[in-house]
Image: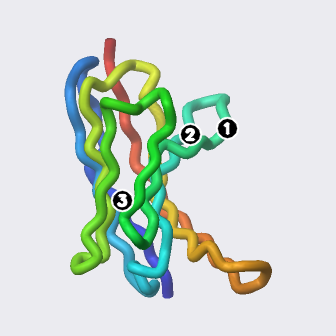
Amino acid sequence: QVQLVESGGGLVQAGGSLRLTCVASGIIFSSNTMGWYRQAPGKQRELVAAITNTGGTNHTDSVKGRFTISGDNAKNTVYLQMNSLKSEDTAVYYCNADNKRWGPLRKIYWGQGTQVTVSP
């Protein structure tokens, strides 16, 4: 059974920092691209950052220079360090695992989400 368990969300003032953690079980962590997505009220879920199984990373433009994704294969864990938080970062943040395989072999999993609220 695959599980992605997020933690680290909370309420923080603008300019503050949080670190989100996602622990994966039931998957071969190093064979997946791990990502953090977020969904604000009334908006579509969007990719925030991702890290490939070879360590390559990408961050959406709105968080570049403020957020950093990293992973620890030994701990089956992916992190999202969020600095200089803004009120527009307020959202539910979801951990995602994607094996990036073709067709019916492709598997995508989601965590339950963790709320991040940034007060002005």
Q: Do the residues labelled 2 and 1 touch (CB within 8 Å)?
A: yes
Percent from the top left, x then y, of residue 52?
Answer: 45, 65
Give the secondary structure at mark 3: strand
Q: Which residue is drawn at 29% across and 37% down?
A: 82
Residue at mark 2: 39
**Given the image, on which type of amino acid does mark 2 rest?**
Gln
Distance CA(mark 3)–CA(mark 1): 20 Å
Which residue occupies the extreme top position in the image?
120
Badge 1 marks a residue whose secondary structure is: loop
Q: Which of marks 2 and 1 is nearer the N terminus?
A: 2
- Mark 3 or 1 closer to N-term? 3
- How many residues crowd around disc 3 within 10 Å: few (fewer than 14), some, or many (20 or more)? many
Location of mark 3 (residue)? 6
Cα separation between marks 3 and 2: 15 Å
Of the pair 103 and 55, the residue shown nearer to us: 55
Instruction: Quote the CA–CA distance across marks 2 and 1.
Output: 6 Å
Residue bearing mark 1? 44
Percent position of residue 91, x then y:
47, 35
